[in-house]
Image (cartoon, grey):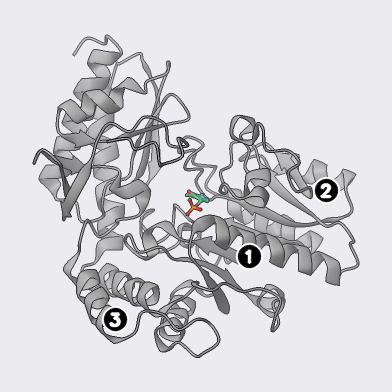
Amino acid sequence: MATPALMQNYGNRTLTLVRGEGNYVWDDAGRRYLDAIAGIAVCGLGHCHPAVTEALHDQARTLLHTSNLYNIPAQEQLADRLAGLSGMDNMFFSNSGAEANEAAIKLARRFGHQRGHAAPKIVVMEGAFHGRTLATLAATGNEKIQQGFAPLPEGFLRAPFDDVAAVEKLAARHDDIVAVLVEPVQGEGGIHVPAPDYLEQLRELCDRRGWLLMLDEIQTANGRSGKLFAYQHREGLLPDVVTTAKGLGNGVPIGACLARGAAAQLFTAGTHGSTFGGNPLACRAGLAVLDTLESEWLIERAAQLGARLQAQLREQLAGCDAVKEIRGLGLLLGIELDRPCAELVELARAEDLLINVTAGNVVRLLPPLTLTDAECERIANTVGTLIQQFGRCAA
Ligand SMILES: *Cc1c(COP(=O)(O)O)cnc(C)c1O
């Protein structure tokens, strides 16, 4: 299948998926897989959800694209909906997560310049993932994927994740910090869940210092964590900027950078833009996703299923020494092993189950929010058994 006409940046891909429906996908030989990755946290409603398909059909027949030279009713509706649901004031729509973060980084830079800093700094975390564009790659805390792309944009200071004291220390040494950019749960970095009050402590620090608290919820939002946005697990907490993307279009490319208060007033006419961002098709998908999350009670379901799946995995893997930790929030789950475990992806596929391994030794589960109880149990049983065999643990 691998045509030389494609750049080889995705490595050797050995599975060809040609169809999806609900929580299942089919390969080119007609074999069916239970999908516990959901396109990397994108297809939260499962594949080809009728509400999204219907909205796309309708919009494709009506008007696909006009550019941001004109008013776009679906873009305004989606912005109003998201503002109401998030507590944020306004937003900019992009086509991807990295672009949403680029917008956030530009907001922080502008915020800094307004405060008289010629070279404002943003605090980012070790193990963070913020994207693959140059600025978001610079913000990403993974030297391996930064290798070979110097010079990267400057203006980032790094602290360990889940360590507010370390950020305080940076504050003491630098007087030009203007923002903190952090994932509420680190996704690509290995499903790291911080202390429950981490975000509140960062909020307090940002308030005290006059910094922007910027949350990268590209992976955690859209119901996956058991709330629409993961910061909503902490009552009353609001960021100044929050970005999202993956689950917002259920497969249609869309991202958003939401802002509040001073951060909401930074972009003025001509300061930022996108040809495709917020186009009618993508925004119709976003609206259909929000409608469905609500009408099918999927956010509550994600919280419930996440707790259940985590409990079942703990039961399955109790006493298995190869397992260092099982952790997660909602349907964003990680099982950290004591050794690299990329082979588990193939082993699970042989059991007709799609899973993912991130950070080398963390099995990552990101199933659709539409999972049934039986499918939840099947994932726990299959993954539990495979890890026991792989880790040579007595069953
Ligand atoms: C996936 C992801 C991104 C990048 O999104 P793209 O759409 O691939 O550009 C950024 N931040 C986080 C936390 C992500 O999970």
Q: Is residue 204 left or right of residue 378?
A: right
| The residue carrying mark 3 has its beta carbon less than 8 Å from ligand 1 | no
Disc 2 or disc 1, which is closer to the eye? 1
Callout 1, which amino acid? Ala
User: What amino acid type should be assigned to the residue bearing mark 3?
Assistant: Gln
Q: Which residue is at 78% across, 61% downward? A: 208
Task: Give the residue at mark 1.
Answer: 103
Name the residue type under label 2: Ala
The mark that comes first in sequence, 2 or 1, is 1
Q: Which residue is mark 2?
A: 171
Q: Position of residue 67 (x, y in %)?
A: 50, 81
Earlier in the chain: of badge 3 and badge 1, it is: 3
In percent of width and height, residue 168 lies at 78, 45
Q: Quadrant of the C terminus?
A: top left
Badge nearest the viewer, 3 or 1: 3
Q: Quadrant of the N terminus?
A: top left
Residue holding disc 3: 59
Q: Nearer the viewer, residue 94 or 157?
A: 94
Q: Residue at x 54, y 42 (%)?
A: 194
Q: Is residue 40 left or right of residue 75?
A: left
Task: Report, in whole angstroms, how far the alpha carbon at label 3 lies from the one at label 1.
Answer: 27 Å
Note whether residue 217 is visible: no
At mark 3, the secondary structure is helix
Q: Callout 2: 10 Å neighbours few (<14), some, many (20+)? A: some
Q: Tag 3 or tag 2, which sits nearer the N-term?
A: 3
- Residue most toward the front? 5
